């Protein structure tokens, strides 16, 4: 089974974006709340968006199932207050749940969390715990996106290793679901979103984890760092050396029981470095589809985000390939198997 | 000739740090200025710091000359105001000039610029133009460090492609010297300095350049992106795809006539990726010595920052190796040859 652990509903029907725009404008101009139940999207619109987009590519490429979450950039946690983010997350996550119901076995939910920067941070983490629980226990989601910079490009929050986040980690451990660490948009002109802020977020958080004892406090917590780990595998020696300089344990011991990298690296040489440097046990197949890059690579004749086709050309032991394509995902997202079984039973009925 | 284009005086005599501390405290507590001429450092102290540090490693490793600049983290442009940064830059650059005079032919200066964030930005760029000119024309420096985030970890300035920086680019072009884009310290708890902020700075600026037409306005401007380009070569496909998505010219055409990467990547696999992906003509040898990582790699028995030893084990055509080790540096830093010749004449006298 081939599991893509990183896909976003970037092709959602336009009504979603319009609801969000109204929500932000109403709150900013008058403090008025546009409520989640004011959004109307028909099943047909969802089916059209998915069948013409993600499902089409998924089928062409031979991916069985995608862990599917709301558009990451559009989480845009800096808008409004903690309640703004809560309503927006409910709307975005409910839509993902509908995709999963409409295409059982092909999409499994990962939720957006109602995070908020500044004064709302602590409240927003309490809200995130509740929204995570709702998504996992009521909507059959198997993971979530955790934004290390809810200020969206200005890094105003403490590191993810700060105790303010601990209630969320307790809930992640209790529910046995991982978080993918994923920034949202950048509203900072100096830091573009998909090709700078995304990668910087990955790099910054890996280093936050190197400096902390988070995994001593939460030995079973699992975090996925997307986009191939940002700059990390390319600079692996730098991190190894820094840990030695500081008298810290090796990366394998300090981090690699808990931290996993995805394969969203859009060229063969980069993927080779990833699979050479990071053991196969810590790599999860993903293509971030439909996401940051949509063009066809003139050198290969395939889309840049067709990671599977590229990964297929890389020499790997059979068991390593199987682990990367799906075996690891089943371990990192242990609820996945149960949800897939339930989907099958529902389809059979 | 082997030229290391990226070394910092991180081992400067303690009096330097004490002067800086007094400068910051005096300004913060009472607006009082501690002046540059209040610093006293004897030649013997400089000689001891260099002979026991950089020169020792340089000789052991077989590097002929290092382009030597003040400690990058310690530029710390966010302290005080534009005049604080100006005095600090004069002090730090004058000390580099003394190193170069004491060890002719082994160290050539790269200067720190008196940048400042916020309201002082524009003034600080005017001051930077003057300090650059002073260092190049009076002290025989051949390049400078340009900080894309003078707020030191909060990214409060416009991108480096903003017109506010144009007077500096005009001066760089006029003097025919390049800038190495290099952030200073991070005062943001979420973004560690050497293993997050440094790499993020490189990645962010590369993307700023991808999005702009800076090099149409300054066709002969040359920028060096250190630390192997941050995350960029590892994510080369992402950048290639993004340029296609936006209908922009290929990276080779848009950037690679003007942008160069250094080799501060501390493991063989990473350096192999760099030399495979980025043509040899755009790579400059550097080791960031003595810098971010100081340990010995137990896997090789050599220090992580002994980039030359690692690069020597990588298969490269002879002409490519020569270009990376020195040929490119002579082109990117065209004043270097003249300064070396002058050094030799002075030694001969």
Image (spheres, coloured by chain):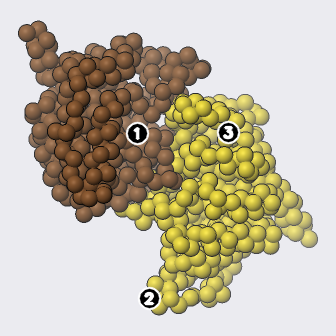
Chain colours: A yellow, B brown
Residue designated by label 1: B229
Label 1, label 2: how far apart the Cα atoms are: 43 Å
Task: From the viewer's side, name the closer residue of B275 and B198.
Answer: B198
* Quarter of image, res A47: bottom right
Q: Which residue is mark 2?
A: A29
Marks 3 and 1, how far apart in space? 27 Å
Decide: few, some or many residues near mark 3? Use Cα within 10 Å; few <14, some 14-19, many ≥20: many
Regarding mark 1 in the picture, which secondary structure is present there?
helix
- Chain letter, disc 2 residue: A
Is B64 displayed left or right of B168 in the figure? right
Q: Which mark is residue B291?
A: none
Quadrant placement of the C terminus of chain A: bottom right
Estimate the x, y position of residue B282 in percent, counting from the top left: 33, 32
Instruction: Tell me the crowding category of disc 2: few under 14, some 14 to 19, or many 20 or more residues within 10 angstroms, Cα based.
Output: few
Percent across and percent down for residue B287 are 39, 27
- The reply to the same-chain question for discs 3 and 1 is no
- Residue ID for mark 3: A254
Q: Indicate the position of residue B176 as horizontal and vertical percent values.
A: 15, 36
Circle 3 marks a residue in which chain?
A: A
> Do marks 2 and 3 share a chain?
yes
| Cα–Cα span, label 2 and label 3 | 48 Å
User: Among all residues in the image, which is located at the extreme top?
Assistant: B348
């Amino acid at each position: 089974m081939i599991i893509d652990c990183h896909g976003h509903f970037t092709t959602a029907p336009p009504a979603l974006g319009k609801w969000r725009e109204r929500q932000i404008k109403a709150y900013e101009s008058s403090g008025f709340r546009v409520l989640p139940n004011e959004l109307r999207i028909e099943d047909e619109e969802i089916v059209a968006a998915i069948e013409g987009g993600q499902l089409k590519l998924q089928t062409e490429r031979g991916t069985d199932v995608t862990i599917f979450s709301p558009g990451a950039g559009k989480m845009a946690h800096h808008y409004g207050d903690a309640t703004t983010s809560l309503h927006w997350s409910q709307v975005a996550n409910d839509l993902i749940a509908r995709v999963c119901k409409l295409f059982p076995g092909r999409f499994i939910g990962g939720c957006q969390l109602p995070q908020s920067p500044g004064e709302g941070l602590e409240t927003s983490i309490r809200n995130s715990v509740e929204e995570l629980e709702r998504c996992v226990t009521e909507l059959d989601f198997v993971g979530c996106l955790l934004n290390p910079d809810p200020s969206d490009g200005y890094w105003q929050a403490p590191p993810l290793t700060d105790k303010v986040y601990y209630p969320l980690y307790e809930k992640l451990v209790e529910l046995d679901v991982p978080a993918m660490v994923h920034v949202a948009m950048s509203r900072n002109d100096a830091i573009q979103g998909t090709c700078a802020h995304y990668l910087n977020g990955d790099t910054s958080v890996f280093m936050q984890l190197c400096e902390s004892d988070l995994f001593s406090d939460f030995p079973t917590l699992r975090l996925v760092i997307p986009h191939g780990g940002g700059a990390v595998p390319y600079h692996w020696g730098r991190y190894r050396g820094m840990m030695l300089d500081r008298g810290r344990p090796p990366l394998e011991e300090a981090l690699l029981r808990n931290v996993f990298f995805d394969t969203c690296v859009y060229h063969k040489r980069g993927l080779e470095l990833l699979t050479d440097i990071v053991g196969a046990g810590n790599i999860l197949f993903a293509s971030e589809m439909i996401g940051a890059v949509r063009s066809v690579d003139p050198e290969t004749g395939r889309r840049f985000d067709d990671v599977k086709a590229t990964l297929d050309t890389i020499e790997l032991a059979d068991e390593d390939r199987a682990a990367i394509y799906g075996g690891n995902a089943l371990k990192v997202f242990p609820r996945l198997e149960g949800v897939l079984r339930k989907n099958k039973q529902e389809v059979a009925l």
